[in-house]
Amino acid sequence: MNDAGRLQEFPGSDDTNCSWNTGANNDVTIGVTYNTSIDNGLSNLYELDETGHWDAGYFEPTEVSGYPAVFQSINDDRPGGGCGLSVAVTDQVFFTSIIQGRPGQDGCKAAENVAEAVIETIKQGA
């Protein structure tokens, strides 16, 4: 990656975010947010789906490295290279990998690759 990750805390939140810009012109953004302040974890996203929250975007349950996950966003930017993927690591904690790539790129595959790397890092205790 062209840029070292920037770790930052969001004001008023227990959540932590890392983001990087990469690519020939730093035009691809990779982000990971650790959602620790939502009591019911990934279930919260399913509850939002039941209310129609994702109707203008997408909500697609999946699995990543054996963990429950869901591709989701309130806007569907997949044709533009964007994708969001949330992965549950416990009943209360999940992380989200977000990619904003280039049009025509598979941002969801990239988000899945990032999520797999995060899971591997967690398993190694790093």
Image: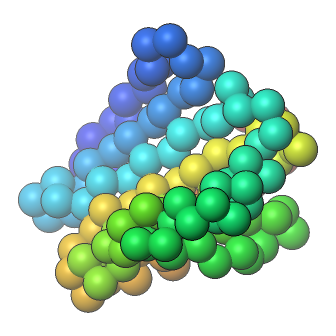
Q: Quadrant of residue 62?
A: bottom right
Residue 122 falls left or right of residue 82: right
Identify whether 21 is placed above or below 5.
Answer: below
Identify whether 107 is placed above or below 92.
Answer: below
Work out whether residue 123 or residue 96 is closer to the camera in this orientation and state it: 96
Image mark count: 0
Residue shown at 44%/13% (left/top)? 11
Residue 124 falls left or right of residue 71: right
Work out whether residue 43 or residue 79 is closer to the camera in this orientation and state it: 43
Q: Quadrant of the C terminus?
A: top right
Q: What's the coloring here?
A: rainbow
- The x and y percentages for residue 71 are 59, 70
Q: Quadrant of residue 72?
A: bottom right
Q: Quadrant of residue 125?
A: top right
Residue shown at 79%/31% (left/top)? 39
Residue 113 visible from this viewpoint = no
Work out whether residue 5 or residue 41 is closer to the camera in this orientation and state it: 41
Residue 29 visible from this viewpoint = yes
Residue shown at 83%/63% (left/top)? 67
Q: Residue furthest top?
A: 12
Work out whether residue 75 or residue 87 is closer to the camera in this orientation and state it: 75
Residue 117 falls left or right of residue 39: left
Q: Residue furthest front?
A: 51
Residue 39 falls left or right of residue 3: right
- The x and y percentages for residue 70 are 67, 67
Q: Residue furthest bottom?
A: 104
Residue shown at 53%/54% (left/top)? 97
- The x and y percentages for residue 20 are 34, 44
